[in-house]
Image: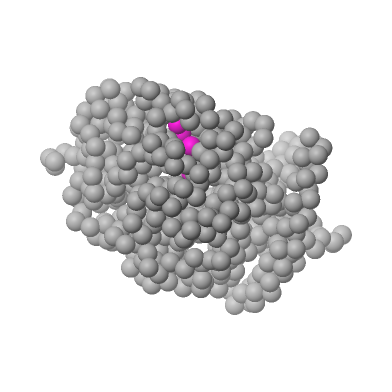
Amino acid sequence: MTARHDIIVGIDAGTSVLKAVAFDLSGRQLASASVRNSYATGPGGAVTQSMPRTWTDCVAALRGLHDRIDGLAARVAALAVTGQGDGTWLVGAGDAAVGDAWLWLDSRAAPTVRRLAAAATDRARFEATGTGLNTCQQGAQIAHMDRHCPDLLDAAEVALHCKDWLFLNLTGVRATDPSEASFTFGDFRSRAYSDVVIGALGLRHRRGLLPEIVDGSQITHPLTAAAAAEIGLPAGTPVALGYVDMVMTALGAGVHTGDAGAACSTVGSTGVHMRAVTADAVRLNAEGTGYVICLPVPDLVTQVQTNMAATLNVDWILSLAEDLIAETGTPPGHADLMARIDGWMQRSRPGSLIYHPYISEAGERGPFVDADARAGFVGLNAAHRFPDLLRAVVEGLGMAARDCYAAMGEMPRELRLTGGAARSAALRGVLAAALDTPVRVSAREEAGAAGCAMMAAVAIGAYGTMDACIAEWTTPLLGAAEPPDPALVQVYDRLFTCYREARVALEPVWASLAASRAHGA
């Protein structure tokens, strides 16, 4: 590697945006380019994405980076790729897509999840993977396909995830990483496939669809000549297959910096709450929910609980305001409404309402799995106004985060926060008080792309270990600790008790509503 090779490009193929981000070898972000993602919804909870278009969008984002960095092709030392997790991206003969990918948002597998979760073998599957079965996952989706549309699987030669599909197009290698492999079909302790898990899913006869597992922090694969011509980089450039996006984001934002008790929450469209522990320190809950996802650090995993929807709830209530204002005049832009959130929070009383933030049509997956779960307010009266509703929605995100961490054990001693919502002082205050812990915000703009770029930096020898890379790429970007407000801590302690009691009490109501919707259809 010559001195000119001083840039690593991280590709982060998210649900809404696909980004290509350039970093220097010390972790400084140099430039980024992005393409808006698109997916289609269909009957029965279908949510799909064009696989060829996803590759085309990746090419466009990488091409866009050339416009922002002079001489990029001569400077790139390596590429790395991560992307949205779960879902099913089927590849057939000639490495062609077998139809559109089923995304993690797809809820068609809900009946299969209920059937498999009720089986006597599911606890053994959970003990191996550390992961509760839900409709997002490739294992559940393939089991559903196997029963209801086996022709899709018959036409496939390998089942990949989003980042794996892009890695295939970049390198010609069919592979997945230890994180997605172990929480879907394997054992997080061995980071390998498990016969117990595959058998519990009823998929022994489909085992041939599972790809090779490669660790992108230890090995890279060369960029093919065909891909090189499309993206404008030299053939043979090392390409690292990153881990799933949620742990790449957490790695870049500080989930593991050597500080005991630290945790990381990404509050974006979804809410991802995780702590880094050794594999033998994982404590699995009796309900069989959450994820255990490997980190690209020896013997370290993340214990994870994820909310299906986080800021999607805020988007929803702001859209209501926008629609109502549009009836009487020119509506404000979404950004203008977002800028008013902290002001509305100041004009409302904490803890006066309960809001369960289950706005996704796919229900909830953390810390409980219920495809029928739905959002709602509890405690409304005629005195409540819009700022009260907005505050309740934001507080609902804090209560959901606490619900998730409670399912994993003790509250964090410190919370590292990333995602778009981290910019809101009001939300940071809610999270700090809800968890009764200081909050630190990572200044890393593109944590997911940084996380996979860090893997490539270790793989090409720019750093001897991941811990050494973390010390330079991650730790210096953590902001000052923001302590919780003691008065709010007391309010939210009381509110959380009500939040949990109401959540449990509403479960049969959600089921009845789902039955009513099905009957009406």
Tell me if 128 is positioned left or right of 133 in this view.
left
Question: 450 or 26, which lies in front?
Answer: 450
Q: Is residue 64 above or below residue 264?
A: above
| Residue 4 in which image quadrant | top left
Q: In this view, does 71 lie above or below 418?
A: above
Which residue lies at the image location 72% right of the left edge and 68% below the top edge? 501
Which residue lies at the image location 39% right of the left edge and 47% below the top edge? 181
Q: Is residue 152 visible?
A: yes
Which residue lies at the image location 32% right of the left edge and 23% below the top edge? 230
Tell me if 455 is positioned left or right of 262 in this view.
left
Question: 107 or 398, which lies in front?
Answer: 107
Image coordinates of residue 48 in percent, x first then y, are 55, 32
| Residue 188 in which image quadrant | bottom left
Q: Is residue 114 above or below residue 332?
A: below
Q: In which quarter of the image is the N terminus?
A: top left
Tally of numbered discs: 0
Q: Which residue lies furthest to the right in this view?
A: 382
Image coordinates of residue 357 in percent, x first then y, are 66, 54
Image coordinates of residue 371 in percent, x first then y, are 65, 48
Whether the magenta-drawn stretch holds residue 187 is answered as no
Q: Quadrant of the C terminus?
A: top right
Which residue lies at the image location 78% right of the left edge and 45% below the top edge? 515
Tell me if 411 is positioned left or right of 25 in this view.
right
Image coordinates of residue 309 in percent, x first then y, are 60, 50
Residue bounds of the magenta highlight: 86-90
Question: 23 or 152, which lies in front?
Answer: 152
Q: Is residue 421 above or below residue 214?
A: below
Q: Is the magenta stretch mostly helix, strand or loop?
A: loop
